[in-house]
Image (spheres, rainbow, N blue to C red):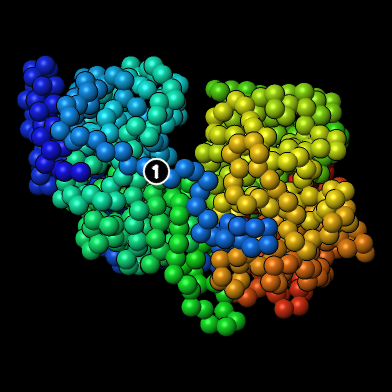
Amino acid sequence: MQGSARSLAWVMSFVVACSARGNDPPVPTDASTRTDTPAATDVPAATDTPAATDTPVATDTPVATDTPVAMDVPAAIDATMPVDRPAPVDVPVAMDAPMSGTSQQIAAVRATPIGTASLRVEGAVVTYTVSATLRSDGMVSSTDPAGFFVQADRSGPALFVAVDPATLSPAPVPGDRVGFTVTRISSPTPATHWAAEIGGFVRTASGASLGALLQDVSGASDLVTGLLNYEHELITLTATITNDFGAGGVGFLQASIATAALPADPLLRLRIPIDVRTALGLRNGCRFTINATPMWRYDVTAQASVWNVRDVSGVTCPPLIVDAGTDVPRDTGRPDTGTPVGDDRVWVLRVGDGVTPLSGSAVPVNIEAYNGSTGTPVGSPIALPTVGSAGNQPLTLSGTAGAEGTLFRSLDGRWVTLGGYTHAVGTLGASGAQAQRVIARINAAGVVDTRTVLGSTVDRSAMRAVVSVDGSEFWSIHSGGSTGDVVYTSFGATLGTSVTNREVFRGLSLFGQQLLAAGSNPTASGVYATSSLPRSAGGFIAPLPGFPLAMTLSPYGIAAFDRDGNGAADVIFFGDDRALLSGGGLQCWRLSGATWSMVGNVTNLTNPIRGLTGRTQGANYVLYGVTAETRARLQRIEVDAATLTGAVTTVATAPLNTTYRGVALAPR
């Protein structure tokens, strides 16, 4: 790929476009005249460490949780398994080909001076959407707002539209072909040039091929020197991390990387959200592939960027050197069992209105937040909608179905997910009554989105749990009589797909590129696993070796950990709602070789456990469980790893005519 040819095509097409508008703004041709996007820092007044440095930051220090991992086989969980997606392919393109009319329109926007405008863009393809990054004060970072990227030709140019997709109708998604009029161009920092306001938004088509726009820049020697010709364009790239991570702006880290064409350019970086880096276990020396994301930048620094776990595949890392008896080094990826910042903040789901006795009828749902260390309530409860409004569906649950209402924090830490029904409050037999099954995702600010439904796929089945990597796609479990389904769908969809063999499950978790499910079936009971994340029919889920091949256990919530740093989960806790004298409570299982075996039950519990989440604390554990009682309690359980002795504290007890169900560490 030759930057000079791309620049010539860009300039010639821009001249044609501008002459048609009676306007002749300056054309940026080199790094000194760029009007492109800084992506790694906040406004100059921000207190973040400058993004262009490699200085380690507090977020790169040890955290207290274990690594999300992906299983190659049920017995061993492999953190380096690539995402279940086809490998990106670079298709050669003549870089001196003239741009399309849409590309000329995009070029005109990019070169127009800051301020008001009236520039129409027609037929652009949406390549990617991003959510806003929040600062510590809850305000949106000025350099990382919500928005979407558009492009028309593989060779560019491309444009970032700093308008929240959720405020547009229909909300743009990748593959949409759209049109809009740019009415304001902004420059939050000197080098930033975005479409800040638009009007006349329309979607003219959907399902456009992003592969036709994707370019492999692993071999591009001008990726830094010709950055102007790549910014915001859809790229794939294979690289190796060459130093430790440092500050990359609010919520982000960055590190130098080496590609085949640029083995030692200090201005080529990987930029990644803190939680995504943690989930993937990326560190100095790891090799990875970015699947398909827009090229970002900070001034003259080229920042190959990812926003979600699914944006990265093919992760391979050098072996870890770990002293005997120590916990996993903090550079490794960790499962969604919490990253405490000070005291734990814990969410627990409550069903019931506190007035009407619970029954199998549909009841309202609220989420309460607590400081797990002190038991102090945090803020007001989050009420799930009971009537539809502004595209959101109602979400209710059965008052007495103990397996419903599981909470899960997404692997990237930004969302808590759950599932329910669109029934009106009071609907009889809620779990089996026909209606849409609905998925909710909730962010750290308590904003609830219930636009995702599953259609006729499981409209008569009990909905029990929902998990997600990053809030853009979901896996859920359902039960109808003696059969069950694992269903996949994407955010905002109206239909789900059954993706594995049919088994009945009560609990569901997600680690790396794998599902873990808790079930009790005639042929097996305990924890089941997939070998990858299934997105279409034909996937397989099977019990982990060592768990009983009979219906003897009664498992619910799962918390898994990697304690020896070898990339495989080797400790699993799960709640079991049988009577304590019959083996119920909180069980601990450990992997030895290729087989799982039961270590024992955590002591000092007075009731069986259903909902479960937690984290490590040195060599030990801090778990949060919901008891299997009529008026359930949320409990903090500090577990001694050597003896399984539990120090149990009740955080909260459900009020009269309500009960608790699922529990999760709060989103960040």
Q: Quadrant of residue 142?
A: top left
Q: In the displayed structure, does residue 586 sit left or right of residue 307?
A: right
Task: Residue 248: name its quadrant.
Answer: bottom left
Residue 108, quarter of picture: top left
For residue 24, say whether it is visible. yes
Relative vertical location of residue 605 with respect to residue 498 in this rendering, above or below: below
Mark 1, secondary structure of its residue: loop
Within-10-Å neighbours for mark 1: few <14, some 14–19, many 20+: some
200, 237: nearer the viewer: 237
The residue indicated by pointer 1 is 88
Between residue 219 and residue 164, name the one nearer to us.
219
> Residue visible at 70% across and 48% down?
541
Q: Is residue 242 above or below residue 321?
A: above
- Residue 607 picture location, percent across and down: 85, 59
The percent position of residue 92, horizontal first and vertical second, equals 26, 38
Q: Residue at x 26, y 51 (%)?
A: 219
User: Could you tell me if residue 351 is visible in this image?
Assistant: no
What residue lies at 84% left-to-right and 28% top-to-bottom?
429
In the rendered image, residue 573, in percent from the top left (x then y), is placed at 72, 62
Give the mark count.
Answer: 1
Q: Locate residue 242, reporting x and y percent.
A: 32, 66
Between 544 and 505, the one nearer to me in the picture: 544
Name the amino acid, label 1.
Answer: Pro
Q: Residue at x 45, y 51 (%)?
A: 313
